[in-house]
C-alpha cells in the first residue's frame, strides 16, 4: 500500500501473472432446487471449482422460473457465484448460464467431451468413469424427486453416462458439488 485517504486507497502492483482458463472445464446442469438451496448449490459448486453452472427446469422441480422470477433467480445465482469466487480466491469466475429445458440440456450433453447424469441406480460409480484430459465435462443433477425416465433416456441417448455417487442419495443442492469434487480430484486441476 502506498497511501490511504478517505474513500481512496493507492496501491502499487508488485507482481502480475496470467492464469490460463482451466482445462478440462466442468459444467454442472443443476435442476432448480426449492427455496434458497439453489444459492447454496451455486456457492458450493463455485468453491469446488465448477466453471459453468446451468439452471435446469427438470420435470420434477418444485420451483419454477418464469418471467421476472427467472431473471431475478438467475441474478441471485450469479451474485452467489461471484461472492463465492471472491471468497475462494478464484482467478476465473464461473458463468451462470441461462435456464435450460430438457432439449437444451440434451444439446449441452451431446456437445460435451464427457457427460455424466447422476443416478442412484447408475451402472458405475462416478469415481470410475473414464475422464477426458481436456474439453468439457458436464454433470447433470436432477431435482429432489430424481429425474424422470423420459429425461434419463434423453440424456443417456445424447451420450451421458449414468453414474452413482455412492450408497446414499444426496439432496439436489449437495449432489452437484460432491460430484464436481470427485471429478475434479481426478484431473490435473487439483494436482
Image: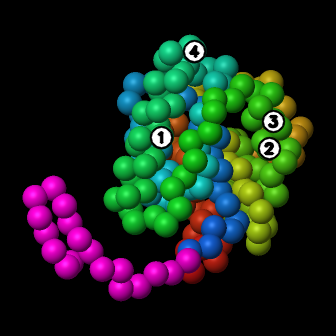
Q: Secondary structure at mark 4?
A: loop
From where the camera sits, is residue 185 visible? yes
Disc 3 marks which residue?
A: 106
Q: Earlier in the sequence, mark 1 or mark 3?
A: 1
Residue found at x 63% / y 62% = 183
Of circles 2 and 4, the one toward us is 4
Of circles 4 and 3, the one toward us is 4
Disc 1 marks which residue?
A: 78
Q: Residues within 10 Å of mark 1 (few under 14, many from 20)?
A: many
Range covered by the magenta-colored residues: 1-18
Residue found at x 49% / y 66% = 91
Q: CA distance from mark 2 to mark 4?
A: 23 Å
Position above or below: 11 against 128 = below
Q: Residues within 10 Å of mark 4 (few under 14, many from 20)?
A: few
Q: Earlier in the sequence, mark 1 or mark 4?
A: 4
Disc 4 marks which residue?
A: 66
Check residue 17 for magenta coloring: yes
Amino acid at each position: 500500500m502506498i497511501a490511504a485517504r478517505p474513500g481512496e486507497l493507492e496501491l502499487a502492483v508488485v507482481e502480475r501473472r496470467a492464469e490460463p482458463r482451466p482445462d478440462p472445464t466442468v459444467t454442472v446442469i443443476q435442476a432448480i432446487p426449492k427455496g434458497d438451496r439453489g444459492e447454496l448449490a451455486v456457492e458450493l459448486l463455485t468453491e469446488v471449482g465448477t466453471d459453468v453452472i446451468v439452471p435446469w427446469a427438470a420435470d420434477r422441480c418444485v420451483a419454477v422460473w418464469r418471467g421476472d422470477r427467472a431473471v431475478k433467480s438467475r441474478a441471485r445465482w450469479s451474485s452467489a457465484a461471484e461472492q463465492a469466487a471472491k471468497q475462494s480466491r478464484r482467478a476465473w469466475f464461473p458463468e451462470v448460464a441461462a435456464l435450460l429445458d430438457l432439449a437444451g440440456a440434451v444439446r449441452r450433453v451431446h456437445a460435451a467431451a464427457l457427460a455424466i447424469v447422476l443416478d442412484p441406480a447408475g451402472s458405475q460409480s462416478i469415481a470410475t468413469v473414464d475422464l477426458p484430459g481436456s474439453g468439457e465435462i458436464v454433470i447433470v443433477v436432477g431435482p429432489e424427486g430424481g429425474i424422470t425416465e423420459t429425461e434419463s433416456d434423453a440424456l443417456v441417448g445424447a451420450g451421458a453416462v449414468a453414474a452413482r455417487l455412492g450408497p446414499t442419495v444426496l439432496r439436489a443442492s449437495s449432489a452437484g458439488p460432491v460430484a464436481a469434487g470427485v471429478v475434479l480430484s481426478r484431473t490435473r486441476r487439483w494436482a
